[in-house]
């Protein structure tokens, strides 16, 4: 990395790069009801496109990790960005919900190439608690994406159709590609190791795999709430599409705050203890959400959801650093394995949440509790190992 490119600018650049997933998800959340009408489909089929997106994102990371460790972070990122831009544009020509699913899968596949490079680049440069701090700062900046993306999506569909959202995503990817070409310098060190050896070293590292599942379950809990956001705010609480981004975005203020505070917490507490406390708070939030589901006001629902989501600001940076500190020579593959499990599990769990769709908030509260409890169990085994 050129010394002229300081770490702050690097973090911002990597945040914009790796924000491709939350941006591509959150911008079209407000458009889901209108998309359901356009495709003459139930909204649950449009919600399912989120799960399909995650499947594509997970599979893309399998190949993206290999390309990243073989060709470098820069080339891998550009391959992903140009592929993502292409399929984002093709989506506007979809004639059915099934075409939408297919093109979103392809779009997400190339998105998987992109995301592995952000975490791998941080691992190339930083180590230990310093890496955890950088991941937290990265998460803080990246949290701006789900905070403002729904507002961007709502503003777009206020004046145009849902298709304009995917034109925006096309331009976003091309703009990021411009800055990667212009400013990003390669950080990885090539090592002669076969693909099988690279993946075997990750999958056989039990402690790393346990922490990967802690991260994946925590992300799954948050994503299950994202997948039901349109139902919760627009259908259940009868908010307008224009008002949706404001209420949805408030959930991520806490996420940004916690990601920023994590840098300070690391001065006094271990990474594992911070993660454990965050998961325990998520369990409590899930219990309270389920117990109060029947007559829960919108502000109270937002409080419980906001607390649950905000704890990921403490979980993401610490878990990611604890995972990648074990892999100095194949950070791209390690990042891809973590991403595949993270997005694959989130896809499966969010699909279950959609499957148990009802007219009440109870299934959502139960899901919050069960997912966080599973994450705590995985963390318990990690600590005992």
Image (cartoon, grey):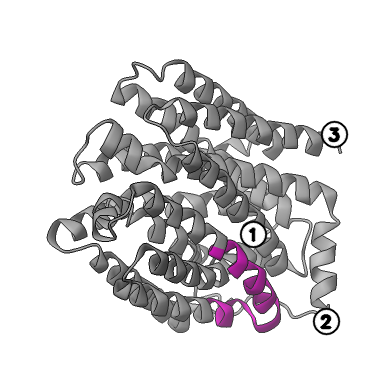
Q: Is residue 246 above or below residue 30?
A: above
Which residue is painted at 58% across and 25% down in the image? 283
What segment is highlighted magenta in the picture?
Answer: 56-77
Describe the element under mark 2 as helix, strand or loop: loop
What is the C-alpha distance between the residues marked 1 and 3? 25 Å
Quarter assignment of residue 289 = top left
Q: Which mark is residue 384?
A: 3
Q: Which mark is residue 340?
A: 1
Q: Residue furthest left?
A: 159
What is the C-alpha distance between the residues marked 3 and 2? 34 Å
Residue 296 pos. (x, y %): 34, 19
Question: Few, some or many C-alpha atoms within 10 Å of disc 1 (few <14, some 14-19, many ≥20)?
Answer: many
Which residue is painted at 26% across and 39% down in the image? 234
Which residue is painted at 64% across and 80% down in the image? 72
Q: Is residue 177 above or below residue 223?
A: below
Describe the element under mark 1 as helix, strand or loop: helix
> Along the polypeptide, which appears first: circle 3 or circle 2?
2
């Amino acid at each position: 990395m050129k010394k002229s490119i300081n770490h702050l600018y690097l973090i911002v650049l990597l945040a914009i790069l790796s924000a491709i997933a939350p941006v591509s998800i959150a911008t079209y959340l407000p458009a889901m009801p209108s998309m359901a009408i356009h495709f003459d489909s139930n909204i649950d089929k449009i919600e399912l496109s989120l799960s399909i997106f995650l499947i594509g994102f997970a599979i893309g990371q399998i190949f993206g990790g290999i390309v990243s460790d073989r060709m470098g972070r820069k080339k891998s990122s550009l391959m992903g960005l140009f592929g993502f831009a292409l399929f984002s544009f093709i989506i506007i020509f979809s004639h059915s919900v099934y075409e939408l699913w297919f093109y979103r899968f392809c779009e997400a596949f190339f998105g998987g190439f992109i995301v592995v490079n952000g975490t791998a680049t941080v691992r190339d440069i930083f180590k230990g608690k310093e890496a955890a701090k950088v991941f937290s700062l990265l998460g803080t900046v990246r949290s701006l994406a789900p905070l403002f993306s729904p507002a961007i999506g709502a503003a777009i569909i206020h004046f145009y159709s849902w298709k304009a959202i995917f034109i925006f995503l096309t331009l976003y990817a091309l703009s990021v590609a411009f800055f990667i070409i212009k400013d990003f310098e390669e950080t990885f060190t090539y090592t002669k190791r076969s693909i099988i050896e690279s993946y075997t070293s990750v999958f056989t590292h039990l402690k790393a795999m346990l922490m990967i599942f802690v991260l994946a379950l925590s992300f799954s809990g948050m994503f299950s709430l994202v997948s039901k956001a349109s139902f919760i705010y627009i259908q259940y609480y009868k908010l307008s599409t224009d008002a949706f981004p404001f209420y949805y975005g408030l959930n991520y203020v806490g996420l940004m705050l916690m990601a920023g505070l994590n840098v300070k917490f690391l001065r006094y507490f271990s990474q594992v203890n911070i993660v454990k406390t965050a998961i325990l708070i998520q369990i409590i939030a899930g219990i309270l959400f389920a117990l109060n589901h029947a007559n829960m006001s919108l502000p109270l629902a937002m409080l419980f959801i906001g607390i649950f989501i905000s704890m990921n600001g403490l979980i993401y940076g610490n878990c990611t650093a604890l995972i990648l500190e074990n892999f100095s020579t194949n950070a791209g593959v390690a990042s891809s394995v973590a991403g595949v499990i993270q997005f694959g599990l989130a896809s499966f769990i969010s699909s279950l949440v959609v499957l148990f769709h009802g007219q009440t908030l109870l299934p959502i509260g139960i899901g919050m509790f069960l997912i966080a409890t599973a994450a705590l169990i995985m963390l318990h085994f990690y600590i005992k190992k």
